[in-house]
Image (cartoon, rainbow, N blue to C red):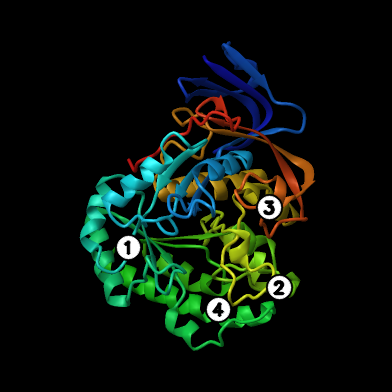
Amino acid sequence: MDLVLRAERMVTPGGETPGYVAVRGGTIAAVGPLAEAPAAERVVELGPGEVLLPGMVDTHVHVNDPGRSEWEGFATATRAAAAGGVTTIVDMPLNSLPPTVDVPSLEVKRKAADGRVHVDVGFWGGAVPGNTAALRPLHDAGVFGFKCFLLHSGVDEFPPLETAELERDLRTLAGFGGLMIVHAEDADTIGHAPPARGTGYPGFLRSRPAEAEHVAIARVLELARRTGARVHILHLASAGALPMLADARRDGVAVTVETCPHYLTFTAEEIGAGATQFKCCPPIRDAANREGLWRGLADGVIDCVVSDHSPCTPELKRLGTGDFGEAWGGISGLQVGLPAVWTQARQRGFGLPDVVRWMAQAPAAQAGLRTKGRIAPGQDADFCVFAPDEAFVVDAAALRHRNPVSAYHGRPLAGVVRSTWLRGREVTGDRPHGRLLRRE
């Protein structure tokens, strides 16, 4: 064996247990009890209080590279991912220039990432008006699925789909088993809400009502029923949509659902005037809604938790004026997602196997990453060494993200990532050895 890691606590698909993991050629060759650990060229003994987890899988990351790399970039995003115990990310198709809406634009993005990534990186394609004919070629080129919006995306070069266009694209994807992932907010509902302006968070919240999510999700579910296509609801913020999602799944609709650490951590009541670092779309809602999302996770209606890391420059956050109407909407949280979720999960009686299921195993399964997210023979030897009982206070300036803007700044969190391993090699942040992934 090349490597053996020994741990008094590790999380496998069977739960938490003491044991060893043996690695050969970057792949997990064996998992078993400590007494049966084989010899290896290198043996790593985890320390007291450390738990061996599979590497986290974050399928919702906006790297913004090329074209808006001053917002983030492949080098900084993947360093931040590794620092947070994330070994695989899937990059969103928008905010980069060009957006990933055809094979040539995918190749531009691959060239921008090549040789610069510290973790493994896959790519989503985009579904926009007029590119239906490009969907199958993108699928064949290895994207993991297709993202669409039902309202303005925030950038003009990635326009939304009207209902007829969405149905046409879903029928196309159903023909070859493709996946549509949807930013589900209804443009008309938001268009009739009072516009966001000024420094008050309640005003911003009124501008993006929960009903906008409910209307859009109902439309997506009806079209999925009609076409037989697979759909995934991105960044669910409103717990009020959970009953219809549960009903659709019982009816056989092929739908999966994600939420994000910020919706499970923050509440609208605690967001002060001008605190635009908390602005995201859909918005962070009230405390009762947050608890509803946790119940959705417990019930299995919500499948996974991913970051929706959507950074920008400090200037675009309008930190000087604190105007929620003008500020960019996005939470920068890739590096702190694991401790943020663990902090909240442990308070509600969940264990590390639950967090691993939500943040590693389920995202990998949802995207079709068959060798990721689990400590089991045949899987990639991707690991996170985690100290769950240690605490730290988030310092935005110390994070590996490109810009020091974070809603988590100053927040105490439980759980420290000690080290991250990618295919049996520790990620140090100096020499990139991540790979660019294609859908199998």
Give the distance between the C-alpha atoms of the residues marked 1 and 3, in whole angstroms: 31 Å
Question: In the structure shown, which secondary structural element does the residue marked by tag 3 occupy?
Answer: helix
Contact between labelled residues 4 and 2, with CB atoms less than 8 Å apart: no
Q: Which mark is residue 274?
A: 2
Question: In the structure shown, which secondary structural element does the residue marked by tag 4 occupy?
Answer: loop
Give the distance between the C-alpha atoms of the residues marked 2 and 3, in whole angstroms: 23 Å
Q: Is residue 404 left or right of residue 412?
A: left
- Percent position (x, y) of residue 180? 35, 60
**Residue that label 3 marks:** 340
Residue 440, placed above or below residue 309: above
| Mark earlier in primary sequence (4, 3) | 4
Location of residue 307 by image quarter: bottom right
- Percent position (x, y) of residue 89? 49, 45
- Percent position (x, y) of residue 437? 39, 39
**Residue that label 1 marks:** 127
**Residue that label 4 marks:** 208
Give the distance between the C-alpha atoms of the residues marked 2 and 1, in whole angstroms: 34 Å
Instruction: Tell me which residue sits at (33%, 49%) in the image.
Output: 106
Q: Is residue 311 left or right of residue 93?
A: right
| Mark earlier in primary sequence (1, 3) | 1
